[in-house]
Image (spheres, grey):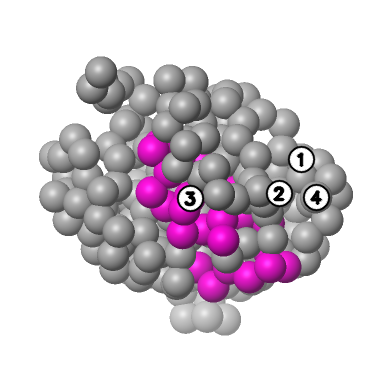
């Protein structure tokens, strides 16, 4: 019986083995690494990740894939599959529970829940590395530099905790069924630029700074100490007349630390 792909689950399975091998190799996984894969589908990427890792945890929402995944991965014993919605899972104790030197997230993510997944893993386990294939347009947004039209709130929130690099583009023809957009693989390496600055307070500041895209910082940050913010901005040759999209991540971090 032919497998029926569910659009509601964002099911576009990667069929090109060259791409899966490339992702696994660029992830630099070793036996000291616990890998989390979200949405393994038929296991094409899983087969490349599992042999390299110390242990791999796979989260798959679609229980129809049980037999397919078990068959595809039967030669390995260093993995487990959790058939459930990843976004509903409590993953806060994974570091303690599995006790590996490093935690990586490596996955071909469903387009429609890319941001919630990244936010969850970043806030709940803060992985050492994230290598994900996502919609190219989203990849451009996440990896954007200040001053570019793609640079926004999510670019700053991620950039405050990770160095982000777009690795390569993936044609829509590499998937079954073929989506109507191309994809890209990005790599996020943990940097912890935020240091001791509380994440929740930083997030509020960034959301406020970007709340009205066409307004400058003076208008968006009215409820803050504008004098102090302006002092920091001027030190880096910016001012309250700049919009949030003009300001580098490091300057936002400096503002958060001082206010």
Compared to residue 178, the image places residue 174 above or below, namely below
Real-space Cα separation, disc 3 to disc 1, in angstroms = 23 Å
Instruction: Say if residue 122 shows up in the picture.
Output: no
Instruction: Decide: few, some or many residues near mark 4? Use Cα within 10 Å; few <14, some 14-19, many ≥20.
Output: few
The percent coordinates of residue 183 (x first, y second) are 25, 53
Compared to residue 12, the image places residue 154 above or below, namely below
Instruction: Decide: few, some or many residues near mark 1? Use Cα within 10 Å; few <14, some 14-19, many ≥20.
Output: some
Residue labelled with disc 3: 46
Residue labelled with disc 2: 125
- Which-is-in-front pick, marks 3 and 1? 3
Q: Secondary structure at mark 2?
A: loop
Residue labelled with disc 4: 98
Please tell me which residue is depicted at 72% across the width and 38% down the height of the picture: 91
- Which-is-in-front pick, marks 4 and 1? 4
| Res 92 label | 1
**Label located before the other in sequence (4 or 1):** 1
Q: In this picture, which residue range is highlighted in magenta?
A: 27-51
Q: Nearer the viewer, residue 1 or 191?
A: 1
- Which-is-in-front pick, marks 3 and 4? 3
Real-space Cα separation, disc 3 to disc 2, in angstroms = 21 Å
């Amino acid at each position: 019986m032919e497998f029926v792909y569910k659009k509601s689950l964002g099911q576009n399975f990667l069929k090109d083995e060259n791409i899966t091998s490339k992702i696994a190799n660029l992830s630099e996984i070793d036996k000291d690494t616990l890998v989390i894969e979200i949405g393994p589908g038929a296991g094409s990427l899983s087969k490349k990740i599992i042999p390299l890792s110390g242990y791999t945890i796979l989260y798959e929402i679609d229980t129809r894939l049980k037999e397919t995944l078990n068959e595809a991965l039967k030669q390995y014993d260093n993995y487990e599959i959790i058939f459930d919605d990843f976004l509903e899972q409590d993953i806060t104790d994974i570091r303690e529970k599995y006790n590996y030197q490093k935690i990586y997230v490596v996955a071909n993510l469903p387009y429609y829940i890319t941001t919630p997944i990244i936010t969850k893993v970043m806030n709940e386990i803060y992985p050492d590395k994230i290598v994900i294939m996502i919609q190219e347009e989203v990849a451009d947004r996440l990896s954007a530099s200040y001053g570019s039209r793609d640079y926004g709130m999510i670019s700053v929130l991620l950039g405050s905790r990770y160095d982000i690099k777009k690795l390569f583009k993936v044609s829509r023809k590499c998937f079954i069924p073929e989506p109507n957009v191309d994809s890209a693989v990005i790599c996020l390496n943990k940097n912890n630029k935020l240091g001791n600055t509380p994440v929740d307070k930083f997030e509020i500041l960034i959301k406020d700074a970007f709340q009205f895209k066409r307004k400058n910082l003076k208008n968006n940050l009215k409820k803050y100490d504008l004098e102090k913010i302006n002092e920091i901005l001027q030190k880096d040759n910016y001012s309250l007349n700049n919009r949030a999209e003009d300001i580098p991540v490091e300057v936002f971090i400096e503002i958060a630390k001082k206010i």
